[in-house]
Image (cartoon, rainbow, N blue to C red):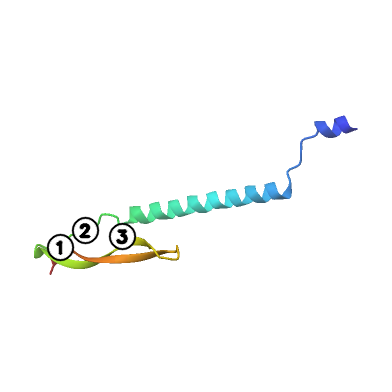
């Protein structure tokens, strides 16, 4: 009798079936989203598709230097042995393109 039971195919547990069901559902959802994105892309309805209008700025642009304050962290060990984070505040110039 035991030999006959061993020869039968093993039944999958409920946990294995649930995992498989979740895997198939996730795969189906990912496929459906990819198909929708492809369809919208072909129709030209997504923001990153090429269209008739250019997304570039006009020619009235200037590059200006903007000074911003940056906080740079550093660590200090206090007399009690605790570590504290402190900040150096420095002014850093940045090149920024301004268009009107």
Point out the image quarter for the C terminus.
Answer: bottom left
The residue that disc 3 covers is 47
Q: Residues within 10 Å of mark 3 (few under 14, many from 20)?
A: few
Q: Which residue ends up furthest to the bottom in the rendered image?
A: 100
Q: Residues within 10 Å of mark 2 (few under 14, many from 20)?
A: few
Q: Earlier in the sequence, mark 2 or mark 3?
A: 3
The residue that disc 2 covers is 52
The residue that disc 1 covers is 97
- In the rendered image, residue 50, in percent from the top left (x then y), is placed at 26, 54
Point out the image quarter for the N terminus.
Answer: top right
Give the CA distance from mark 1 to mark 2: 24 Å
Q: Residue at x 41, y 65 (%)?
A: 79
Camera-side residue of 98 and 56: 98
- In the rendered image, residue 7, in percent from the top left (x then y), is placed at 81, 31
Camera-side residue of 40 and 66: 66
Tell how many labels. Answer: 3
Give SS at disc 1: strand
Q: Earlier in the sequence, mark 1 or mark 2?
A: 2
Give the CA distance from mark 2 to mark 3: 12 Å
Q: Which residue ends up furthest to the right in the rendered image?
A: 1
- In the rendered image, residue 90, in percent from the top left (x then y), is placed at 22, 65
Camera-side residue of 82 and 35: 82
Q: Is residue 27 left or right of residue 13?
A: left
Q: Residue at x 70, y 50 (%)?
A: 15
- In the rendered image, residue 64, in percent from the top left (x then y), is placed at 11, 64
Give SS at disc 3: loop
Q: Residue at x 68, y 48 (%)?
A: 17
Camera-side residue of 1 and 47: 1
Give SS at disc 2: loop
């Amino acid at each position: 009798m035991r030999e006959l039971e061993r020869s039968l195919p093993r039944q999958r547990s409920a946990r294995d079936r649930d995992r498989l069901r979740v895997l198939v559902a996730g795969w189906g959802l990912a496929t459906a989203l990819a198909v929708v994105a492809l369809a919208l892309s072909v129709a030209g309805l997504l923001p990153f598709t090429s269209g008739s209008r250019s997304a570039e700025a006009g020619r009235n642009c200037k590059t200006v230097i903007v000074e911003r304050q940056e906080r740079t962290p550093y660590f200090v060990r206090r007399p009690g042995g605790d570590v504290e984070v402190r900040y150096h505040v420095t002014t850093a110039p940045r090149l920024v393109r301004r268009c009107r």
